[in-house]
Amino acid sequence: MPIDMKKMIAEAAWRLLTEKKVRKLTVKDIVEECHITRQSFYYHFEDIPDLLRWVLEQGLERMMEKNRAKGNGEESIRYFFLMAINAMPYVRKTMESNYGEEIERLLRQQIYRLFERAVEENQLYRSCSQSELKLILRYHSSAVIGLLQEWTEEDTRNLDQIAHEVYLLMAGGISPFPQ
């Protein structure tokens, strides 16, 4: 069975950040962890931010595939929150590394892309201009990030209700104006 070198490198970096709690992740640490040469690392990735971007993109693709299988926007949002809640302890550990700011920036980009694809696939906001759509996506992405940053145990207990309300907000089912 051929080895997926990119995946092996990514898993080594993840282990260093989450299990070994490395605060200053370096290429040297990664190549030593997976027993490869620096040249092999640089053959697959330009640098560590490129590796982190690839890891997040792969995670987004897997999540989108699972969401498509659900076929329901509200269930997809619930699944997203569930995945994010389960990933939170690991994300917090990686944020403590020297790449914390880069990881946060990449997470924001990936959440934006997730919403962008969901809007496209579900044909939401078709009457909006590109600039309006961009603002709406930024708004929803930032709102969800804010929710996740302040997530509580009570929120976890109310996950179904929160997913339902976020879905209604995105789909236009909740309006501050009287009907």
Image (tube, rainbow, N blue to C red):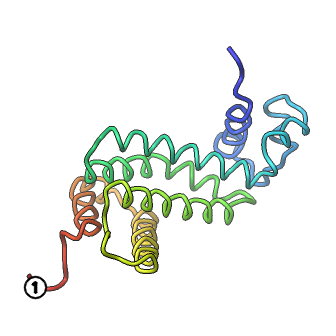
Q: Residue at the location (31% across, 64% down)?
A: 124
Q: Residue at the location (50% across, 59% down)?
A: 113
Q: Circle 1 — which element?
A: loop
Q: Is residue 21 left or right of residue 41?
A: left
Q: Position of residue 31 (x, y in %)?
A: 84, 36
Quadrant location of the C terminus in the rendered image: bottom left
Q: Is residue 14 left or right of residue 33?
A: left
- Count the labels in the image: 1
Q: Position of residue 16 (x, y in %)?
A: 72, 41
Q: Using the image as rendered, state which of residue 67 and residue 122 is in the foreground.
A: 122
Q: Position of residue 41 (x, y in %)?
A: 83, 39
Q: Using the image as rendered, state which of residue 15 and residue 178 is in the foreground.
A: 178
Q: Residue at the location (75% across, 60% down)?
A: 98
Quadrant location of the N terminus in the rendered image: top right
Residue 8 drawn above or below residue 2: below
Q: Position of residue 144 (x, y in %)?
A: 40, 66
Residue 62 drawn above or below residue 47: above
Residue, disc 1: 178
Type of the residue with mark 1: Pro
